[in-house]
Image (cartoon, rainbow, N blue to C red):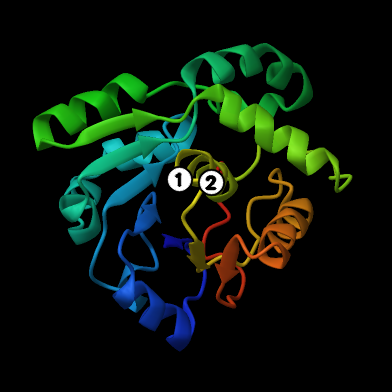
């Protein structure tokens, strides 16, 4: 079960409660609507979201973060280092977008007794390729949610995936319209079940 930061709904909350493996994101903002099991917290390990989480004692003590056995960093440092120069030209306002905090998350996991996994840049690039079929508007990077969906599909090809809290809306530089279409194709193929949600609770950089 992959839980975004949008509305969960009653059916989604029931599915979360029954799930065998639960992944949440960043500040786990939908936790109050679906408390309980958390196996992984997937984090944006670059830019403002990373800095905010690492600087927050409340994040480290969040019950979902405490319960998780692993932190997944969704942004491959090599990929984001390569993005820095082109983004400086195209989106100068995102001057801290590629600042890398991967080592700090690794240290946090070492201190907390958690595994730390960095999602490989090949997953990011495969997502970009899959989105191209849906003619996305100009975007900076796919959302963390879509990166994690792709990574789970790659790691566990025989496992059915359920989504809750995915409204496919939020930060303007994620290609949410194309992401919705791509996930629709996975739903139609029977690979994913998506429980209805309203718009994401977060529109911050890189959410």
Q: Find residue 192 and report its horizontal and vertical position in percent.
A: 58, 63
Q: Find residue 141 and report its horizontal and vertical position in percent.
A: 66, 35
Is residue 140 visible from the viewing direction of this image?
A: no
| Quarter of the figure that contains the N terminus | bottom left
- Say which quarter of the image contains residue 19: bottom left
At x 62%, y 70%, the residue is: 199
The front one of 9 and 100 is 9
SS under mark 2: helix
**Residue named by callout 2:** 153
Q: Find residue 200 and report its horizontal and vertical position in percent.
A: 57, 65
The front one of 121 and 66 is 121
Tag 2 and tag 1, C-beta contact below 8 Å? yes
Count of marks overlaid on the render: 2
Is residue 56 visible from the viewing direction of this image?
A: yes
**Residue named by callout 1:** 156
At x 70%, y 62%, the residue is: 189
Residue lying at the far right in this picture: please name it.
135
SS under mark 1: loop
Up/down of 107 relative to 17, above or below: above
Q: Is residue 115 left or right of residue 89?
A: left
Q: CA distance from mark 2 to mark 1?
A: 5 Å
Up/down of 17 relative to 201, above or below: below
Residue 91 is labelled as none
At x 46%, y 29%, the residue is: 46
The front one of 64 and 206 is 64
């Amino acid at each position: 079960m992959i839980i975004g930061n949008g509305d969960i709904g009653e059916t989604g909350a029931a599915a979360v409660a029954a799930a065998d493996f639960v992944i949440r994101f960043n500040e786990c903002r939908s936790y109050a609507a679906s408390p309980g099991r958390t196996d992984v917290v997937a984090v944006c390990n670059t830019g403002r979201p990373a800095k905010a989480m690492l600087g927050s004692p409340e994040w480290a003590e969040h019950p979902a973060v405490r319960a998780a056995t692993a932190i997944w960093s969704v942004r491959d440092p090599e990929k984001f280092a390569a993005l820095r120069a082109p983004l400086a030209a195209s989106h100068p306002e995102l001057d801290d977008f590629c600042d890398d905090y991967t080592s700090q998350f690794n240290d946090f996991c070492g201190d907390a007794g958690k595994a730390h996994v960095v999602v490989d840049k090949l997953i990011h690039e495969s997502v970009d390729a899959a989105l191209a079929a849906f003619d996305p508007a100009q975007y900076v990077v796919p959302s963390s949610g879509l990166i994690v969906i792709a990574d789970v599909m790659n790691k566990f090809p025989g496992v059915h995936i359920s989504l809750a809290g995915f409204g496919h809306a939020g930060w303007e530089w994620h290609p949410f319209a194309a992401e919705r279409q791509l996930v629709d194709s996975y739903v139609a193929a029977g690979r994913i079940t998506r429980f209805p949600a309203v718009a994401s609770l977060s529109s911050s950089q890189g959410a």
